Image (cartoon, helix red, strand yellow):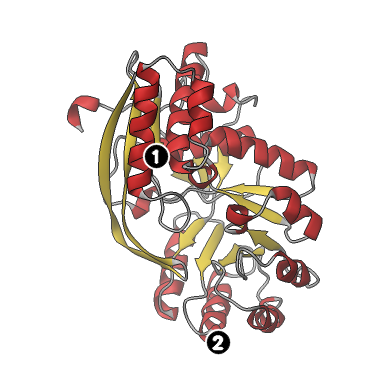
Amino acid sequence: MISLHEFSLTLNKPFSTSFGTLTSRTGFLLKLSHSEVGIGESTPLHGWTESLTSCRAALISAKKDTLLGSPPETILESLVNTPSARHGFSLSILDDLSHSKGIPLYQYLGADYVNSIPVNIPIGDSSLTSTVNQCMAAINSGAKSLKIKIGKRPLKEDLKRLSAVRIAVGPDVELRADVNGAWSLRQAQKAITKLEQIDLDYLEQPLSMHDLEGHATLRNSSINIALDESLISNSLTDIHKMGAADFIILKPMVLGGIDHSYALAKEARSLNIEPIITTTIDTVVARTAAIHLAASLAPIKACGLATAHLLKSDISADPSTLKGGNLTVPQSPGNGVFVDWSSI
């Protein structure tokens, strides 16, 4: 049987991208009721996953199916079209299984000991001065990699923002820019001539999720291309065949779970496309699971998992610590997150 709890968490301040602005995160915690572990999270994101209403309906249906004795494999298959719901159910199973083995989730996925993973710090859309100030604050706190949201403002303004950040942080900081599909091919080509001087680690999703041919064209430049939204409407095989990406951004909540994301990451590496793990600004439950996923793939480039500070409050204590541009990997059994269900 599954226990469900709906929650809503407010962000410290709106997080703006060309894709939209987030002010809160609403979703569901679920637990396999026969134990105190087996905890999962389903937090849908508009435009990326199913709606909150559809997620709720899918989880209620899954709960009924467990009461009827349906095997987990059958329930997971029924949730394939509701990725955030599937994420929650599959994570609850993984947490339970790895906890029963007495090993952390990342080791259950097959990795050896990993102490920490590198992360980038996300910087939302804001004015030039605010962007530089946020970046400098992150660097002064130990960050070594930054990802800046662009594409919402005129191209000229975004290029000035990125140039100002590079000058402020110096040449040794890893700098990434995420357009969230806001540019046309012509805009992207114009931008790249300028971006080559800024020394970006990669340019993320500059074009529409459907435009694999355009992304392949952009890869003829010296700037690496990372795809994110494109995985919503294209298979990894199609992305590889078109030669559209150097990196692939994997969001477990969008892709239907840690298990699906792990399989995609392994497939990507076999195709010489490097995976980067990120969250969708989730609670500590899903965020920690994504840390375990990244650890299971170590060594790995900086991932987008340092998002705890974006939430005003959280479901439970965070078992991971951010220090010197790295997040520690929890070493307790399972996902490593304890939720006091009596207090939520």
Question: Which numbered disc, 1 or 2, marks the residue closer to the eye?
Answer: 1
* Residue 321 is at least partly visible in this image: no
Give the camera-side residue of 109 and 32. Answer: 32
Q: Determine the residue located farthest toward the left in the rendered image.
A: 343
Q: Which residue has dot 1 on it? A: 42
Q: Position of residue 300 (x, y in %)?
A: 66, 43
Pointer 1 with pointer 2, Cβ within 8 A:
no
Residue 69 to residue 60: above or below: above
Where, quadrant-wise, is the C terminus in this rendering?
top left
Number of the label disc, if any, that sits on residue 237:
none
Q: Secondary structure at mark 2?
A: helix
Q: Residue at x 54, y 49 (%)?
A: 119
Q: Position of residue 71 (x, y in %)?
A: 49, 17
Residue 186 to residue 11: above or below: below
Q: Is residue 29 left or right of residue 161?
A: left
Q: Residue at x 44, y 42 (%)?
A: 84
Q: Earlier in the sequence, mark 1 or mark 2?
A: 1
Q: Marks 1/2: CA distance?
A: 38 Å
